[in-house]
Amino acid sequence: MKKTHRGAGTRYLTRVRQREALRDTRRYRHRKRSGRGWRARPARRFTLRQPSLTKPVETIPAPENFDVVGNPEEFIATFDKLEAVMRNGSVPLLDFSERTQTVSSDAILAMVAIATRLARKYATVVRLRWPTDPVLAGAFASSGLKSYLEDTPPTDTDLGMIRRRHNKKVESKTARDLIAFSTRALFGERRREHASYATFIECMGNTFEHSDKHAEGQETWWASINCDPLARKAQCTFVDIGIGIFESVAFKGFVRRMTGAVRKLTSRPQVLRDLLQRKIGSRTGESYRNRGMPKIYADARAGLLQNLIIITDNVYADITRDEFKTMNRRFKGTFYHWEFTT
């Protein structure tokens, strides 16, 4: 039989296919048989060390005004100290019993989100010393934190609810549960709140673009709602502990298109204002993209979302008052807080 001679290009492609086949064989060798077919071994395994009980404990006093909206820089500074303690190999103890006078629901959610991220990063725990003042202790109890930590439905005495991300999709059911919980607590019945529901959905959708691609699949957002029946007001908070708006692919693509002179003159508060006002297009150039954050901005300016605050990186934006400023501290992620009354 006559042999067929293959060229160098064909032989090279054959070797490439052989290497790919060998790599696939090694990759799928550890697959396990399940009832619904083959189940692949995860590409990466995150195995955290158990927290050591012999680590030294270092106390960090909580700020006098434990509030992200009203006291953002001192709040961020407290958790910068907390991370420094964990980096040095000690266990931080956040103490609310000494000088703390006020506690807000938005700070409680941000505390849970940041502490969870740091505990995962440094494979240790964050300890809390609860306030002795019954009023401050009641603020923690009414935030829904106890129900969240015990992984039980909110009790009748809770005026708040805390939820975290469970999967990679936008969780419309979580948004509906938050709105239903708040309207029942305020009015005794379930009511619709379109603007706040849409804002929760948009924030969840933005999390994918503003998340750390190396930590994809982990919980990166947290949401809470806290009710004040006397004022007939609900406070909504959403915390995305990813990389933030200014580190996202869309923003970096916009910066690359700017000239050197314009880049130096443009401040980050102004860039965030332009992004919210949709003066900055999406990275794809498609007209129907980049509508999420401008929609939130428009609802706030129309009064559908009251006292909307956005904090990302070192930018503090009071959307309701149209004030954008630079902070001396950097918030690692994106923070949203707003209120509604119906």
Image: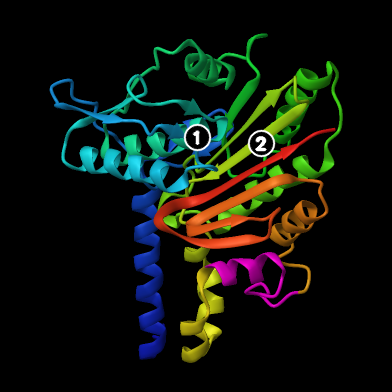
Identify the residue at horizontal 65%, vertical 19% (top origin).
159
Splitting the image into 4 quarters, where does residue 11 fall?
Answer: bottom left
Residue 299 higher or lower than 11, as above or below: above
Determine whether the residue tagged by mark 1 lies in a helix, strand or loop.
helix
Please identify the quadrant where the N terminus is shown: bottom left
Q: Nearer the viewer, residue 338 or 121?
A: 338
Locate residue 64, reporting x and y percent: 40, 32
Q: Which mark is residue 17?
A: none
Q: Secondary structure at mark 2?
A: strand
Question: Is 220 located above or below residue 105 in the figure?
Answer: below
Who's the residue at 48% across and 15% down the image?
Answer: 137
Dot 2 amino acid type: Cys
**In the picture, residue 213 is in which quadrant?**
bottom left
| Percent x, y of residue 193 | 83, 36
* Of residues 218 and 116, the one drawn nearer to the viewer in this rendering: 116
- In x, y percent, where is residue 150? 49, 14
Which numbered circle lies on residue 107? 1
In whole angstroms, how far apart are the C-alphas of marks 2 and 1? 12 Å
**Residue found at x 39% / y 65%:** 20
- Residue underneath mark 2: 236
Name the kind of residue labelled 1 in the image.
Answer: Ala
Q: Earlier in the sequence, mark 2 or mark 1?
A: 1
Left or right of 182 in this view: 221: left
Confirm whether the magenta stretch covers residue 293. no
Would residue 182 be found to the left or right of residue 239 on screen?
Answer: right
